[in-house]
Amino acid sequence: IPIPRRVPVSRPAIVTDGQGGLWCGYRGGGLSHYEAAHLRTFTTEDGLTENRVFDVLEDRQGRVWAGSYALDLFDGQGFRQLDRIVGIRGLSEDRAGNLWIGANVGAFRYDGTQIENMQIKGGASDPGVKRIMEDRTGHIWFPSEEFGASRYDGERFTNFTVADGLPSDEAIA
């Protein structure tokens, strides 16, 4: 895959889409789509809020989402900003079709209509969330580099730390 030159790649945001294409986000170089031997790179000139793309996700409806310093949605030609959330680091979709957003300021859920701040720590300063995953029972998990891991059961959060048996409060998975 021809990656644009001089574009630093940290933990790459990379995903394959339903059409067999590959999306790859860069730290400063935008977001590239590679399909059928054709590479197109999207930048702020194409509607991305920021050229730093920390995560990319294709949802079940085939929509491509980019997370940077905002949540951007691909419309087939370029991107448009859906919401400004500080420092998006992780995107995930649950089995109900909700989009989960991990950011420097906590976790958010987009139900297709509105974005809700999930307030993991009950309104206190929420931890930065870089990853989000759903387990086989439908619980949503949020590892944090400061406060261990949190589980959302659909109604409330349960936080797990060293006091609960974790080997560290720095959960980075």
Image: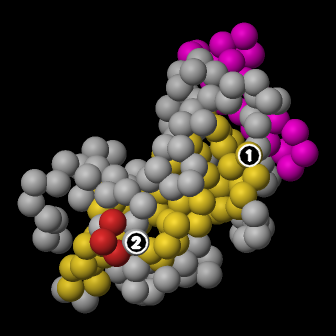
Residue extending farthest right:
155
Q: Could you tell whether 150 is left or right of 101 in the image?
A: right
Q: Nearer the viewer, mark 2 or mark 1?
A: 2
| Residue at the spot of label 2 | 47
Task: Give the quadrant of residue 109.
Answer: bottom right
Percent from the top left, x then y, of residue 68?
A: 44, 53
Percent from the top left, x then y, of residue 113?
A: 76, 70
| Residue at the spot of label 1 | 117
Tell me how far mark 2 sits from mark 1, CA to CA: 24 Å
Q: Is residue 37 visible?
A: yes
Percent from the top left, x then y, of residue 164?
A: 74, 16
Give the residue type at disc 1.
Asn
Count how many numbered circles sit on residues in the image. Answer: 2
Magenta segment, which residues?
Answer: 148-168
Residue 21 against residue 91 in the figure, above or below? below
Residue 97 against residue 171 in the figure, above or below? below
Q: Is residue 57 visible?
A: no
The residue located at (68%, 18%) in the rendering is 161
The residue located at (76%, 37%) in the rendering is 119
Pointer 2 with pointer 1, Cβ within 8 A: no
Q: Could you tell whether 45 is left or right of 131 in the image?
A: left
- Which of 68/49 is in front? 49
Residue extending farthest top:
163
The residue located at (34%, 75%) in the rendering is 46
- Which of 29/151 is in front? 29
Residue 148 against residue 53 in the figure, above or below? above
**Does label 2 or label 1 sit earlier along the sequence?**
2
User: Dot 1: within a 10 Å radius of its alpha carbon, few (fewer than 14), some, or many (20 or more) residues?
Assistant: some
